[in-house]
Amino acid sequence: MKKIFALSFFLMACLLFAGAQKQWSLEDCINYALTNNVDVKQQMLSISMGEQDVLNDKLNLLPSLNGYASHGYNWGQAIDPYTNEFATKRVGTDNFYLSASWVLFNGFQKSNTLKQDQLNLQATRYAVDKFMDDVSMSIAAAYLQILYNTELLKVATGQLDITRQQVERTRKMVEAGTLARGDLLLVESQAATEELNVVNTQNNIDISILTLTQLLDLPSAEGFAIEEPDVSILKNPRSPLSPDEVYAFANTTQPDVKSAELKLKSSEKTLSLARGTLSPNLYISGSYGTGYSGAAKDYSQGIDPFTQPPIQIGNTASGEAVYSLPQYLYTDYKIILFDKQLSDNQNKSVMLHLSIPIFNGWMARTNIAKAKIGIESASYTLATTRLNLRKNIQQAYADAVASLKSYAAAEKKVTATTESFKYADQKFNVGLINSVDYNEAKKELTAAQAELLQAKYDYLFKNLILEFYMGKPLTLK
């Protein structure tokens, strides 16, 4: 048991260590966010709501059926609905009722409502896709920012190491009397500045990691690390596709464009619904009802039904005698049975209804005019969406081309400043230049390296955008 416990503890520790050391790729981050991000989950609820609307529209095409039942007691003088007699004692009653109706024709409003909600559901799905695309882009930007700051930290750390080595060399040269102490102070000042730069760059890394983990809705940024992919694409960078090529593809696939197209079709269904209100409505309905009353009596068991004979109340024109009806006197009765009353008191009806709109305050015509305006507004929205898509693609293309040119120029500058700094370093070591000139050469090299990194990651992001518009997944592999 001790061995089993020790082995279990070791395996658990290994799993925890492996989890803590997990490195997140860009795909891992995007997939996690699209599955766990609270905002994404909330957007998905709008799809569920739309699905319920479509289901309700489909069921609304079926006939409606409703039932009703009641049980109660009456006191005081009232006419019993089943005996049509006055009842003065407490009377118990039961009522049962079924009604059904079915719309035969209403200007196709039900079918158009179903089609409109189906269009709205699909538009909502595309809108959610657009939201998820925006989240993915935000994650890609935050991911690349971490990579940029990480490489910037490597540059800053490397420069600090060089400066620290130079501090030691300068100190020895001052002690040997080759250089003045002021040169040492200047180099030490440069080292302190670069130490601060390292700290600030590390802070920027921490902030960019926090930004990414917040996009992922992770509880903490502690232990979070990302992969550092090989971005060797810039060893042989290629020019991005032309804006027209990208737009021609994106215009048929981008979810915001598809959503705007469906909303335009939905507004056309709104016009059809408005016109449908001018159409006659035809529907059929039926009902079935029955009930029970405690006042319904059966006198068939009575005794001596003719206690008062008929009385002559007049004569006919021919002289024949006219008598009153017999006066019945029942001495015994019983309440009619429940099931017999339910059978005897049945009431059934079937009706065909036709409603023809004639004048309703010009409401239908007003709704038709508003629906036409809505179609025009939706068409403008679609045109604006396509225009913005073209602008975004053109801007991304221009930025990608500019950053690619900047990268090429920055690469040349880094090569030149590196050689210049090597030469300055050699001259400084033999006392041919002072520490001021040395620091200037070093600053130029650091600035050139930073510009190269900036252009590199700017190109990567803009190129990711263009490839994403072409339907390719966001990846750095």
Image (spheres, helix red, strand yellow):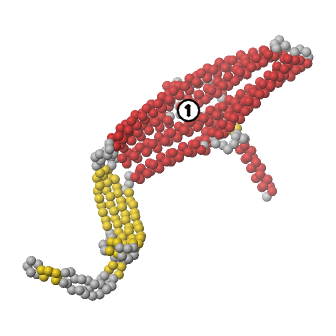
Give the image location of residue 45, x and y in percent.
53, 46
Q: Does residue 44 appear to the left or right of 421 in the view shown? A: left
Q: Quadrant of residue 275?
A: top left
Residue found at the very far right of the displayed protein: 176
Q: Is residue 13 above or below residue 466?
A: below
**Res 350 quadrant in image:** bottom left
Residue 269 at x, y percent in the picture: 38, 41
The residue under the point 80% across, 24% down is 191
In the current view of this chain or complex, which residue is farthest to the left? 318
Residue toward you, 433 or 87: 87
Q: Nearer the viewer, residue 48 or 241?
A: 48
Quadrant the N terminus occupies: bottom right
255 on left or right of 339: right
Residue drawn at 35 percent across, 73 percent down = 77
Q: Badge 1, how many Cα within 10 Å: few under 14, some, many 20+?
A: some
Q: Which residue is mark 1?
A: 468
Q: Is residue 339 visible?
A: no
Up/down of 468 relative to 58, above or below: above
Q: Position of residue 264 (x, y in %)?
A: 42, 37
On the image, the x and y values in percent for residue 102 come to 34, 55
Q: Amino acid at mark 1?
A: Phe
> For the C terminus, which image quadrant?
top right
Residue placed furthest toward the top: 432
For label 1, the SS is: helix
Point 39% across, 41% down: residue: 270
- Is residue 441 rendered to the left or right of residue 46? right
The mark total stands at: 1
Along the line of sight, the residue nearer the viewer: 358 or 250: 358
Query: Residue at horizontal 36%, vertical 61%?
Result: 99
Q: Work out whether 126 lies above or below 100.
A: above
